[in-house]
């Protein structure tokens, strides 16, 4: 599961979404060997899996099913392979979304995705917002409470779920910003667009894929935090 030079090979699942290259570049920047693929065999040979996504929930579910990737992603988790969902990929991890007329997700995280109330704030929630760390997680090591992160989304999970490790506040509502359950991780925000702290999160995920969960090493543009 290691690539050239012993770097962790991390599959970036290609199911027709648009932010693949930015995720690929971020993983490479923190020392991983990203593998952009929709080939089940390639995913099985990787130490970790990233499920990115920008767009509509229903179209994403249909694409995963048409390409046979739903089974590939869930099988990877069953094998104990770490999985990171980003933005729409994060929402796909949940049991259900109200988007696209209501559709079931992968069911890897508990809870439902619902539209942000337009009476509370402008939809989509787009721009920078502060993370509110709820509990420790290896995904968030070295990421400080109050860190700014970049969001673009119209649907969200509430921040009260058991799997929520970080939230954010928008329009007076508490929304889930990051979740973790066993080897399943996810962020509603875009780490690859969130500066050095976003790269920190990708570095943490790569370290999880490599089997290490403790030492926090510097990432490009940022010194290690105590």
Image: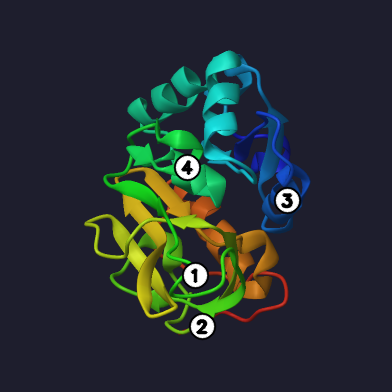
Which of marks 2 and 1 precedes in the sequence? 1
Residue that mark 2 sits on: 225
**Does label 4 or label 3 sit earlier along the sequence?**
3
| Viewer-proximal residue among 81 and 187 | 187
Front one among 107 and 49: 107
Question: How far apart are labels 3 and 1 at the CA level?
Answer: 18 Å
Marks 1 & 2, CB-CB < 8 Å contact: yes
* SS label for mark 3: helix
Check disc 4 and report the residue beneath it. 99
Q: CA distance from mark 4 to mark 3?
A: 32 Å
**Callout 4: few (<14), some (14-19), or many (20+) C-alpha neighbours within 10 Å?**
some
Which of the marked residues, 4 or 1, is nearer the chain's N terminus? 4
Q: Residue furthest front?
A: 119
Residue, x 58% and y 32% (percent of image)? Answer: 60
Q: Is residue 206 above or below residue 12?
A: below
Image quarter of the N terminus: top right
Q: Is residue 162 left or right of residue 13?
A: left
Left or right: 42 as drawn, with respect to 146: right
Q: Nearer the viewer, mark 4 or mark 3?
A: 4
As helix, strand or loop, the secondary structure at mark 2 comes to loop
Alpha carbons under labels 4 and 1: distance apart: 37 Å
Residue 1 seen from this side:
no
Q: Residues within 10 Å of mark 1 (few under 14, many from 20)?
A: some
| Label 3 vs label 1, nearer the camera | 3
């Amino acid at each position: 599961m290691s690539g050239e030079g012993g770097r962790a090979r991390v599959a970036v699942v290609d199911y027709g979404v648009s932010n693949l290259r930015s995720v690929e570049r971020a993983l490479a920047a923190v020392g991983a060997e990203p593998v952009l693929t929709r080939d089940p065999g390639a995913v099985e040979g990787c130490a970790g899996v990233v499920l990115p996504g920008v767009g509509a929930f229903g179209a994403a579910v249909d694409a995963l099913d048409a390409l046979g990737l739903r089974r590939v992603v869930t099988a990877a988790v069953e094998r104990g392979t770490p999985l990171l969902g980003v933005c729409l990929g994060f929402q796909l991890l949940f049991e259900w979304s109200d988007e696209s007329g209501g559709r079931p997700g992968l069911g890897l995280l508990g809870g439902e995705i619902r539209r942000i109330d337009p009476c509370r704030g402008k939809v989509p929630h787009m721009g920078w917002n502060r993370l509110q760390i709820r509990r420790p997680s290896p995904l968030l090591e070295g990421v400080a409470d109050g860190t700014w992160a970049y969001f673009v989304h119209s649907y969200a999970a509430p921040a009260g779920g058991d799997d929520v490790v970080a939230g954010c506040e928008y329009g007076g509502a508490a929304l889930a910003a990051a979740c973790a359950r066993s080897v399943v991780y996810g962020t509603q925000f875009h780490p690859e667009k969130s500066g050095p702290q976003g790269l920190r999160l990708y570095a943490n995920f790569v370290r999880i894929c490599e089997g290490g969960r403790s030492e926090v090493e510097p990432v490009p543009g940022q010194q290690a935090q105590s």
